[in-house]
Amino acid sequence: DSGVTQTPKHLITATGQRVTLRCSPRSGDLSVYWYQQSLDQGLQFLIQYYNGEERAKGNILERFSAQQFPDLHSELNLSSLELGDSALYFCASSMGAGTGKQTGELFFGEGSRLTVL
Amino acid sequence: AQTVTQSQPEMSVQEAETVTLSCTYDTSESDYYLFWYKQPPSRQMILVIRQEAYKQQNATENRFSVNFQKAAKSFSLKISDSQLGDAAMYFCAYRRGYDKIIFGKGTRLHILP
């Protein structure tokens, strides 16, 4: 158990719809990262938050948005869904700068599997 | 921009044998982290091993060890005494400081009984 919680684990929806994926980071972690993994592909970085602020953006579509709340949980919002958005969406967390010894790795949740029909 | 390349999309190894997965990366930084993550059929991302670039000694974790060649920007993973449970997708990854992790495309490892 990595300590990172993602909900829902599975989600099936239709094209054009909007969904929200939720992530609770490990206790004490300030940084949250979102990744997308399409079928048999590598992990593509979407966005990073640190203590509520957006820190880095990857190849995130304009139809997608995210935020990190004061309690440090994060949400990834996907709208106007298309078939190609079907993927496994991972949230990961890590210690942020100034929080102690950095071990470097990200701790991943189990992912949210999104199927768009 | 930093990149991570895994040139072996798939590999197979006989149970109890040793296998080496290759990885090269490109960076102009001198201080960074390198990782191997394992993704079994459950799709969970599991850290296998971590290497800090400033450390010359190669990291080891039980049956898993790396060959870190900083000048050559090479970071291979050796799995000794392969077990059926080692069957998975293996991702090589790079991270600078507190930035995002950059993943390679992965190597699918099959273990033959």
Image: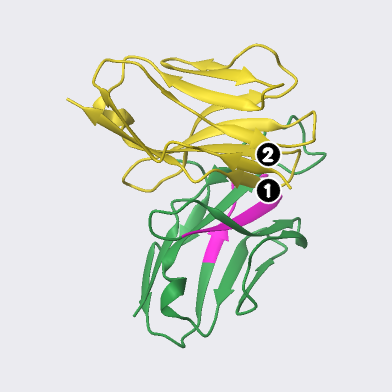
* Residues packed near mark 1 inside 10 Å, few (<14), some (14 to 19) or many (20 plus): many
Q: Chain of mark 2?
A: B
What's drawn in magenta, residue-wise? A22-37
Please give the residue where the numbered disc 2 appears in the rendered image.
B95
- Outermost residue to the right: A98
Where is residue A26? Give x, y as percent.
59, 46
Where is residue A115? Give x, y as percent.
37, 72
- Outermost residue to the left: B113
Point 80% across, 34% down: residue = B29
Q: Chain of mark 1?
A: B
Depth check, front residue: B56 or A21? B56
Instruction: Name the kind of residue labelled 1 in the image.
Output: Lys
Determine whether, in the image, residue B107 is placed left or right of residue A31.
left
Q: Are marks 1 and 2 in contact (CB under 8 Å)?
A: yes
Indicate which disc residue A49 carries: none
Colour for chain B in the figure: yellow
Determine whether, in the image, residue A85 is placed left or right of residue B10.
right
Chain in green, by letter, is: A
Magenta segment main secondary structure: strand
Quadrant of the rendered structure where residue A54 is?
A: bottom right
